[in-house]
C-alpha cells in the first residue's frame, strides 16, 4: 500500500498541497480528479520525488520514501506532454530504463520489443519518437513506463492532448495492460470526471491542494459531500440554483417559485443551493431559455442556455443542432437535484443517482 | 464574403501520380461554417491550400461567387488564414497587428482605427491593444490572427488550419465559443480544418469527413451521427463508436443471426458483405428479453450513465444505460431497438 | 524549359563558386611567385606567365630572411585545441547549471549570470589585456603555453556558455526528470540523456571556440615575447619593409588549412542530419 500522509507544500505563499493524505492499494487504480491547479500534478511529483513537500510522509509497504532521491524511487510516470528520449529509437527508448538498471542489453531489448508489441507499435521500433504521431508517442511513453514493472505507476493526464477517439482506445488499452500488473499501485490524475469515474477503483476529489472526498466512484458521484465536490465531479458542469425555502414552498432566486415538494423531501425554511445535473434538464417544457452555445462531443450535445438571469447547462444524448440565440422550452427535474445547505454541505441526495 | 464553389476539383502532386485529392463537387454557402475533418494525410490540407491559392489544382475549378479564381495566387483571393501556430508580427503591438492588413491596402487612418477598435472589442482584445503582441499567450495570439482576418471587410473567407492545436485544453472551449459567435455575428464564410471530432462537430454547420483523399461524407453533424455514410464514419464520429454486426440475407431481409435485428433488403442488392449498425444511444435496456440478448462483458461507470458491453455470438455491442441498474459482468441483459434506428451497410457503405 | 532552368542554375552556381574560389587561387599562385612575379598585372599560369619559386614556402621554415613558423604553428594548435576543449567542457557544465537550476545572489539571477559571461566578450580586448598581463605575471605564466591556455579558456568559455545555454533551454526539463525516474542519477542523466541531445550545440560551440582561438592575434601578441610565439604573431613577423607577398600567401594557406578541415568535418556532420531531429 502506498501511503501519503499530511503532505504539505507551499510555494510563494500558494498552497499546492495542504495536508493531503491518500492511501492507494496495489492492483487498483486510484484516480485523482480535480481542475487544473488542484494539486494533482504536485502530488504525483511529490511521490516521484521531483518536488519536496515541506512536511508529511510518503511510504510504500511501510518503507519511508521521504529521503529518497527520484532515481532511487521505484516509480514510473507518464505525463501530459509526450516525453521520450529524442536521440534514441523507439525500441531503445523503451529498453533504456531496463538497461540503466543493469539488465543485459539483449534481454532489455527483447522485453522492450514485447511491450511495444502490446501497445501496437511493433512496426515502429526503429523510428525516432519525433517521427511518430502524438498518440503513438504517448504509447511509447506508456510502454517505457510499464516495461519497468515499477511498483508505483504515476499517470498525469496521459491522454489529455489527444482527441476523443484516441483517448477512448488508449484508455481501454491501458486498463487491459494494467490487468497483468496486479501488484502495481496506480495513481491516475485527470481533469475529466468521466475518465476518473470510468477508470478508477477509487476516486479522490481534489481542489486547491486539498482532498475534498475519496471513495468508490459510484459513492463519490452519487453523493458528493460538498458543493465544491459536486462541481469537481460533474462534467458538463452541474447547474447551481440558489434557492430559498419559505413557509409557502421552494423559491429559486432566478426562476421563481416551484411546485411544493419539488425536491422530494420537506426541508426546514432557509437558504439552500440546488445542484441539478446537466442531464436532468430536458428540452420540451415550460421554462423559456435562450441558447448561448452548443458543444457536440462524442455522441452528445451540451447546450449552454440562459433562462432569464439563470445560466443553465443541458446535456442531451444525441447530436442536436439548437441554433445560437434560439428559444427552447425546458423541463427541470428538480426531484433529482442534490440539495446543499448554506454551508455547502450535502443535505439531500437526489432521487435515483448511484 | 463569398460563396465558394469547387467544380470537378481534384489534385495530383505530379502528372500521373495517384490523386492526393479525389474528384469532388461542392458548394459552400456564403456565411456558412464548414469543417474538413480527417486524420493527417487525408487530403484536407491539400483542399485548404487549393482554396487559399497556395496550390493550383491539377483538375477542376475554384469559384468565388461564380468568379473563376483557380489560377489566381494566394494574394489575389482575399482569403484570411489562421494557422496551427499563431502567426503574428512580433515587433508590433496588438493594435498594429490588427491594423496591418488595412494599412497595407491604404485607407484613411480614422476609419482603420475605428474598425480595429470594433474588432478588438468583439474579440475581447481591447485591454491588450497597446501591448506588444510578443507578450501574449498562445490563445490570445490566435485571437489576434483571427482578428487580422476579420478587420478586412472584403474578406472572402477565413480558413482555420487546426487553430486550436497549441491551445491549452482549458482555453479551447473558450475559443470555440468565440469562433461560433463571430460567425453568427459577422456571417463570414469560415472553413475549419481539424482532426478533432469535437471541434468539427461543435463548430460547423456542415462537416466534410475525409479519408484517403476522398470526401467520405458531407453533412450536418446530426446527419453524421444519425446516418453515417460509411462504417468508417460510424466509428470515427461518436463515443462509444457505432455498433456494427455482420448480417445475412434471409427471405428478403438483412438479419443478424440469433437476434431480432433486421431490415428489409432493397431490391436488387447483392447479398454479400452486409452489416447492420446502430448507435449505442438508441438502444434501451429491457431486462431479460428484447431485440437482442447477450452477456454483460464489461461495464464502464461514467457517472450519469454506464457503458455496457454485451457479448453475443454475432459480436460485441456497446450500449449506454442509466447508471444504477445494478448490472454486473456475467449477467444476462437484453435491449430493444426501433427499426428506424437501424442502418444497413454493404461493403462499408450505407444502403438503407 | 526544364533544361534551360537547370542550365541557368548551374551557371549561377559556377559563377558564384568562381567568385568564392578566386581569392584562394590568387593566394596559391602568389605563394609560388617571386618579387618579379607579383609586380605587373595578374598572372595565372606558372612557367608560361611567371617563373614559379619555392622561396615563399622556404621562408616559412626560416629560409631566405623568413621566420620559422613550425614551432609557433604547433604552439597555436596546442593552445587552441586545449583551450577550446577546456572552455567547452567548463562552459557546457556551466550552461547546464544555468539552464536547470535557479541561482540567486541578492538581485542577481540566472539571466544576469549568463549576461555576465557574455559581457566578457562585449568589452574591447584592450580592457582585458592589462589585467591579464598582470595576472599572468603574478602567476609567473607570462610567455608560456599554460598561461596562454588559461587566457584562452577565459576568452572562449563565454562563447560556449552563450551557445549552450540556449541549447539546453530547448530541452524540456521533463526529460531530465524522466531519466531520473528511469534510474539515472544526475551525472548519468547529463551524460546519457542530455548531452546526446545537444550534440549540434556542442559542434557549433566547439567550432566557434576553435575559430576564435585560432584567429586571435591580440592576446597572443600582448602576452608573449619570444619563447612561446603563436602563429598569427609569427606571420606578422614575416612582414618587412618590402612586403613579402609570396611568404605571406604561403603562411596564409597553412594557417587557413586547419579551419578548412574543420569546415569540412562540420559540413559532413550537418549534412548527415546532425542538426535535424535531435531536438524536438
Image: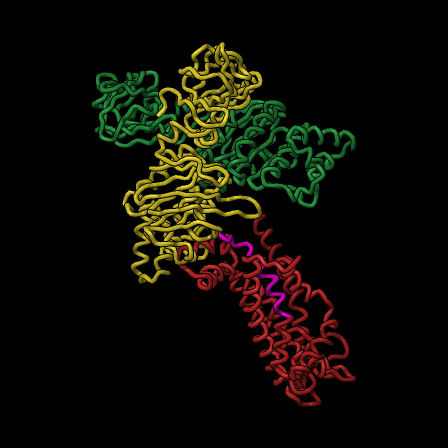
Chain colours: A yellow, B green, C red
**Is residue A161 on the magenta stretch?**
no
Q: Main secondary structure of the magenta part?
A: helix
Which stretch did the figure color magenta?
C155-174
Against C209, residue A328 (above or below) is above
Residue placed at 40% from the left, 44% from the top?
A155
Residue placed at 45% from the left, 10% from the top?
A260
Q: Which of A73 and B107 is in front in this view?
A: A73
Exactly how many numbered labels are in the figure? 0
Q: Nearer the viewer, residue C110 or B22?
A: C110
Q: Whole-percent x and y of residue B339?
A: 31, 16
Residue placed at 40% from the left, 49% from the top?
A77
Residue placed at 70% from the left, 43% from the top?
B92
Quadrant including the N terminus of chain B = top right
Left or right, A102 with reference to C131: left
Against B182, residue A286 (above or below) is above
**Is residue C161 on the magenta stretch?**
yes
Q: Nearer the viewer, residue A55 or A239?
A: A55
Left or right, A337 with reference to C98: left
Q: Whole-percent x and y of residue A268?
A: 46, 17
Left or right, A143 with reference to C125: left
Quadrant including the C terminus of chain B = top left
Answer with the quarter of the image where residue C204 lies.
bottom right
Q: Whole-percent x and y of residue B47?
A: 52, 34
Q: Whole-percent x and y of residue B338?
A: 31, 16
Amino acid at each position: 500500500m502506498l501511503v501519503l500522509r499530511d503532505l504539505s507544500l507551499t510555494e510563494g505563499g500558494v498552497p499546492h498541497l495542504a495536508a493531503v493524505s491518500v492511501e492507494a492499494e496495489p492492483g487498483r487504480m486510484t484516480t485523482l480528479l480535480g481542475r487544473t491547479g488542484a494539486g494533482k500534478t504536485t502530488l504525483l511529483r511529490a511521490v516521484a520525488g521531483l518536488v519536496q513537500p515541506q512536511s508529511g510522509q510518503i511510504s510504500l509497504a511501510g518503507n519511508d520514501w521521504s529521503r529518497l532521491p527520484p532515481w532511487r524511487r521505484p516509480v514510473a510516470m507518464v505525463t501530459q506532454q509526450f516525453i521520450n528520449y529524442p536521440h534514441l529509437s523507439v525500441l531503445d527508448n523503451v529498453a533504456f530504463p531496463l538497461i540503466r538498471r543493469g539488465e543485459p542489453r539483449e534481454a532489455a531489448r527483447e522485453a522492450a520489443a514485447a511491450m511495444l508489441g502490446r501497445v501496437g507499435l511493433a512496426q515502429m521500433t526503429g523510428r525516432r519518437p519525433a517521427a511518430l504521431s502524438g498518440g503513438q508517442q504517448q504509447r511509447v511513453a506508456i510502454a517505457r513506463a510499464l516495461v519497468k514493472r515499477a511498483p508505483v505507476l504515476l499517470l498525469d493526464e496521459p491522454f489529455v492532448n489527444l482527441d476523443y477517439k484516441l483517448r477512448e482506445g488508449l484508455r481501454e488499452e491501458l486498463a487491459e495492460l494494467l490487468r497483468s500488473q496486479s501488484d502495481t499501485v496506480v495513481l491516475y490524475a485527470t481533469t475529466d470526471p468521466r475518465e476518473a469515474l470510468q477508470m478508477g477503483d477509487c476516486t479522490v476529489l481534489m481542489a486547491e491542494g486539498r482532498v475534498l472526498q475519496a471513495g468508490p466512484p459510484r459513492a463519490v458521484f452519487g453523493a458528493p459531500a460538498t458543493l465544491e465536490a459536486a462541481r469537481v465531479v460533474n462534467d458538463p458542469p452541474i447547474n447551481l440554483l440558489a434557492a430559498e425555502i419559505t413557509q409557502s414552498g421552494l423559491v429559486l432566486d432566478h426562476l421563481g417559485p416551484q411546485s411544493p415538494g419539488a425536491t422530494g423531501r420537506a426541508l426546514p425554511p432557509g437558504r439552500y443551493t440546488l445542484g441539478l445535473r446537466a442531464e436532468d434538464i430536458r428540452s420540451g417544457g415550460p421554462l423559456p431559455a435562450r441558447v448561448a452555445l452548443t458543444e457536440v462531443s462524442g455522441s452528445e450535445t451540451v447546450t449552454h442556455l440562459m433562462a432569464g438571469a439563470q445560466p443553465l447547462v443541458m446535456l442531451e444524448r444525441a447530436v442536436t443542432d439548437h441554433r445560437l440565440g434560439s428559444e427552447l422550452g425546458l423541463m427541470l427535474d428538480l426531484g433529482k437535484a442534490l440539495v446543499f445547505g448554506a454551508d455547502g454541505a450535502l443535505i439531500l441526495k437526489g432521487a435515483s443517482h448511484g | 464574403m463569398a460563396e465558394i464553389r469547387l467544380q470537378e476539383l481534384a489534385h495530383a502532386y505530379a502528372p500521373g501520380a495517384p490523386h492526393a485529392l479525389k474528384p469532388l463537387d461542392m458548394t459552400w454557402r456564403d456565411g456558412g461554417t464548414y469543417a474538413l475533418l480527417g486524420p493527417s494525410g487525408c487530403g484536407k490540407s491539400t483542399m485548404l491550400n487549393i482554396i487559399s491559392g497556395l496550390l493550383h489544382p491539377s483538375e477542376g475549378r475554384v469559384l468565388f461567387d461564380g468568379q473563376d479564381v483557380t489560377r489566381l495566387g494566394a494574394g489575389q483571393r482575399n482569403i484570411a488564414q489562421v494557422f496551427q501556430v499563431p502567426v503574428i508580427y512580433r515587433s508590433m503591438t496588438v493594435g498594429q497587428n490588427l491594423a496591418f492588413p488595412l494599412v497595407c491596402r491604404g485607407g484613411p487612418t480614422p476609419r482603420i482605427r475605428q474598425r480595429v477598435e470594433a474588432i478588438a472589442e468583439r474579440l475581447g482584445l481591447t485591454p491588450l491593444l497597446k501591448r506588444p503582441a510578443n507578450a501574449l499567450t498562445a490563445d490570445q495570439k490566435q485571437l489576434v490572427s483571427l482578428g487580422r482576418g476579420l478587420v478586412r471587410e472584403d474578406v472572402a473567407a477565413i480558413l482555420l488550419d487546426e487553430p486550436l492545436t497549441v491551445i491549452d485544453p482549458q482555453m479551447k472551449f473558450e475559443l470555440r465559443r468565440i469562433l461560433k459567435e463571430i460567425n453568427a455575428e459577422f456571417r463570414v464564410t469560415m472553413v475549419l480544418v481539424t482532426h478533432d471530432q469535437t471541434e468539427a462537430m461543435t463548430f460547423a454547420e456542415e462537416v466534410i469527413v475525409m479519408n484517403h483523399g476522398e470526401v467520405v461524407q458531407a453533412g450536418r453533424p446530426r446527419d453524421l451521427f444519425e446516418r453515417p455514410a460509411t462504417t468508417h464514419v460510424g466509428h470515427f464520429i461518436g463515443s462509444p463508436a457505432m455498433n456494427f454486426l455482420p448480417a445475412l440475407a434471409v427471405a428478403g431481409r438483412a438479419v443478424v443471426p440469433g437476434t431480432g435485428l433486421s431490415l428489409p433488403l432493397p431490391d436488387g442488392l447483392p447479398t454479400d458483405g452486409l452489416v447492420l449498425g446502430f448507435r449505442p444511444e438508441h438502444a434501451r435496456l429491457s431486462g431479460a428479453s428484447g431485440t437482442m440478448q447477450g452477456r454483460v462483458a464489461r461495464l464502464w461507470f461514467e457517472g450519469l450513465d454506464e457503458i455496457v458491453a454485451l457479448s453475443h455470438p454475432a459480436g460485441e455491442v456497446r450500449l449506454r444505460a442509466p447508471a444504477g441498474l445494478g448490472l454486473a459482468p456475467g449477467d444476462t441483459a437484453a435491449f430493444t431497438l426501433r427499426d428506424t434506428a437501424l442502418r444497413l451497410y454493404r461493403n462499408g457503405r450505407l444502403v438503407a | 524549359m526544364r533544361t534551360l532552368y537547370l542550365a541557368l542554375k548551374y551557371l549561377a552556381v559556377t559563377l558564384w563558386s568562381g567568385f568564392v574560389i578566386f581569392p584562394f587561387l590568387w593566394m596559391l599562385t602568389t605563394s609560388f611567385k617571386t618579387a618579379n612575379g607579383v609586380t605587373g598585372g595578374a598572372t595565372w599560369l606558372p612557367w608560361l606567365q611567371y617563373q614559379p619559386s619555392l622561396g615563399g614556402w622556404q621562408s616559412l621554415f626560416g629560409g631566405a630572411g623568413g621566420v620559422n613558423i613550425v614551432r609557433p604553428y604547433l604552439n597555436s594548435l596546442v593552445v587552441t585545441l586545449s583551450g577550446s576543449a577546456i572552455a567547452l567542457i567548463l562552459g557546457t557544465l556551466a550552461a547546464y547549471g544555468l539552464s536547470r537550476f535557479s541561482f540567486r545572489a541578492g538581485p542577481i539571477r540566472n539571466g544576469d549570470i549568463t549576461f555576465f559571461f557574455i559581457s566578457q566578450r562585449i568589452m574591447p580586448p584592450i580592457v582585458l589585456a592589462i589585467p591579464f598581463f598582470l595576472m599572468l605575471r603574478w602567476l609567473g605564466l607570462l610567455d608560456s603555453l599554460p598561461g596562454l591556455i588559461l587566457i584562452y579558456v577565459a576568452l572562449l568559455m563565454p562563447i560556449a556558455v552563450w551557445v549552450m545555454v540556449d541549447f539546453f533551454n530547448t530541452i524540456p526539463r521533463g526529460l531530465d526528470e524522466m531519466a531520473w525516474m528511469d534510474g539515472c542519477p544526475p551525472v548519468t542523466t547529463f551524460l546519457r540523456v542530455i548531452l546526446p541531445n545537444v550534440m549540434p550545440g556542442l559542434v557549433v560551440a566547439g567550432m566557434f571556440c576553435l575559430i576564435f582561438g585560432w584567429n586571435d592575434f591580440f592576446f597572443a601578441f600582448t602576452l608573449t615575447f619570444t619563447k612561446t610565439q603563436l602563429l598569427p604573431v609569427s606571420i606578422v613577423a614575416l612582414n618587412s619593409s618590402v612586403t613579402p607577398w609570396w611568404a605571406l600567401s604561403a603562411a596564409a594557406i597553412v594557417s587557413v588549412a586547419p579551419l578548412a578541415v574543420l569546415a569540412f568535418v562540420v559540413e559532413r556532420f550537418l549534412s548527415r542530419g546532425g542538426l535535424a531531429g535531435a531536438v524536438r
